[in-house]
Amino acid sequence: MEFVELTRGGGVPAHVRIERRLRAAIDSGEIAPGDRLPGERDLAARLGVSRMTLRQALAALAAQGALVRVPGRSGGAFVADPADRRAECDLTGLAGFTEQMRRAHLTAQAWVLRAATAAAPEEVAAALELEGAARVHEISRVRSAGGSPVALEHSFFPAAPLPGLLERDLTGSLYALLTTAYGLRPSSAVEHLDPVVADDGQAAHLGVAAGTPLMRIERTAYTAEGVPLEYARDLFRPDRVRVTVRTG
């Protein structure tokens, strides 16, 4: 990649324009995984910005997992392998995993471990506000980003308003499927975060050792009318996903 001086950006901060330029070069393969960027002093001079401005851009790319910054005289900023990138999971909105990974410039995939319809367990029935012998669709999936497993999803949906759900393609975005096939779109959610450790089965699915720390997100999602649509317990690898909540 040719690092040339920035032109004025029409109100866009310089560090954002640097971040976007480097991100585009990384995503297009112009800068390959393992490539080392020029040193900060040299790169800042080529771009015509201060080192502080450059550092803001590099820090943002490192937070996205696009760069790995190695300290020391032989270190520097290196382009991360896509399989090792740490994606940001922003809980501020209600974007599903597929959309979250798209924002992180990673390809999301899913492997279905279990898809069954059964009577709702007590905890699930309470979360979904179901009564009596109500049944639910249970879907468990391993989610990957950049070809590497990063999350284990375990979701429950009320069966009555979603006939035939399990006969559909469950390897893509379930939220998109609910919206397009049933006209039911998750609009809000209550989510709880807890640190846990992986048991043997979870570790095998996520490609980590048993006892590895994980982040559990327990979620109840609602339609715009306030009707519970999903109860989920998802497990994320914190070495691959950073959970973010924005305020203000």
Image (spheres, rainbow, N blue to C red):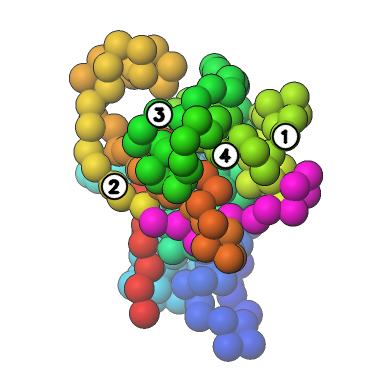
Q: Which mark is residue 121?
A: 3
Dot 1 falls on a residue whose secondary structure is loop
Q: What residue is pinned by disc 4?
A: 158
Neighbour tally class for label 4: few under 14, some 14-19, many 20 plus, Cα within 10 Å: many
**Magenta-colored span:** 180-190
In this rendering, the answer to whether 147 lies above or below 9 is above
Q: Is residue 178 left or right of residue 42?
A: right
Circle 3 or circle 2, nearest the eye: 3
Question: Along the line of sight, which residue is nearer the eye, 158 or 28?
Answer: 158
Provide residue 133's location: percent of width, then percent of height: 50, 30
Provide residue 231's location: percent of width, then percent of height: 45, 42
Circle 2 or circle 4, nearest the eye: 4
Q: Which mark is residue 163?
A: 1
Extreme-bottom residue of the structure:
11
Neighbour tally class for label 3: few under 14, some 14-19, many 20 plus, Cα within 10 Å: few
Neighbour tally class for label 1: few under 14, some 14-19, many 20 plus, Cα within 10 Å: few
Counting residues from the N terminus, which is met first, the one under dot 2 or under dot 4? 4
Q: Amino acid at mark 4?
A: Pro
Q: Amino acid at mark 1?
A: Pro
Q: Amino acid at mark 2?
A: Leu
